[in-house]
Amino acid sequence: MRHCLRSKIHNAYVSEANLAYVGSITIDESLMDAVGLWEGERVLVVSNTSGARLETYVIKGDRDSGTIAMNGAAAHLIGEGEQIIIMGFELTQAPIVPRVVLVDRHNRLDRYLSETESQIVV
C-alpha cells in the first residue's frame, strides 16, 4: 500500500486567516467538488510564499465564494494573501490519476491539469 496524490488545488490564495477559529482549512465547496475532497478529510497545505507546510482537515466553505481560510493554529504558519497548494492523498495498492486544478487569483477554477502539466505551470 502506498499514499498517492489524489486531489490537488494548485496556486490558491488564502482569503483569510482566523486565529480565533477552531483549527482547520475552509475551502470553497466548488473547489472541493472539483478535486474530490471531503469535509473532514486530512490535507497537506504548502505555502508557495513562505515554504511552510502543515497538515489539517477540511471544512466546507460556501459554494462559489472563493474562500480559502486558514483557521486556528494553522493561521500562525500560513497567513492571508499567501499562495498555497492543497493536497489530498489516498492509500492504494495501484497507481491513481490525481484530480488537479489550477485556480485564479480569486480562487475560481481556471482549468484542470494533469499532474505532469501542473509541474510545468508556475
Image: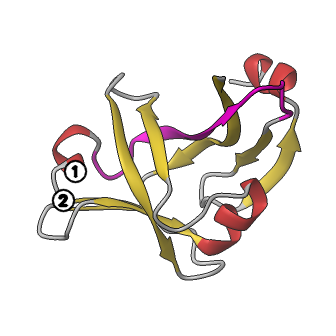
Nearest to viewer (mark 1 / mark 2): 2
Pointer 1 with pointer 2, Cβ within 8 A: yes
Relative placement, left or right, of 10 versus 98 is left
Q: Is residue 68 among what the camera can see?
A: no
CA gap between label 1 and label 2 equals: 6 Å
Q: Which residue is mark 2?
A: 72
Q: Which residue is mark 1?
A: 75
Within the image, what quadrant is residue 30 found in?
A: bottom right
* Circle 2: residue type: Gly
Residue depicted at 11% across the width and 69% down the height: 20
Residue 84: say if magenta: yes
Q: Is residue 30 above or below residue 2?
A: below
For disc 1, the neighbor class at 10 Å (few under 14, some 14 to 19, many from 20) is: many
* Circle 1: residue type: Ala
- Image spot of residue 31 (x, y percent): 67, 63
State the quadrant of the N terminus. Answer: top right
Along the line of sight, the residue nearer the viewer: 81 or 67: 67
Dot 1 falls on a residue whose secondary structure is helix
Along the line of sight, the residue nearer the viewer: 23 or 82: 23
- Image spot of residue 80 (x, y percent): 32, 53
Q: Magenta residues? A: 79-97
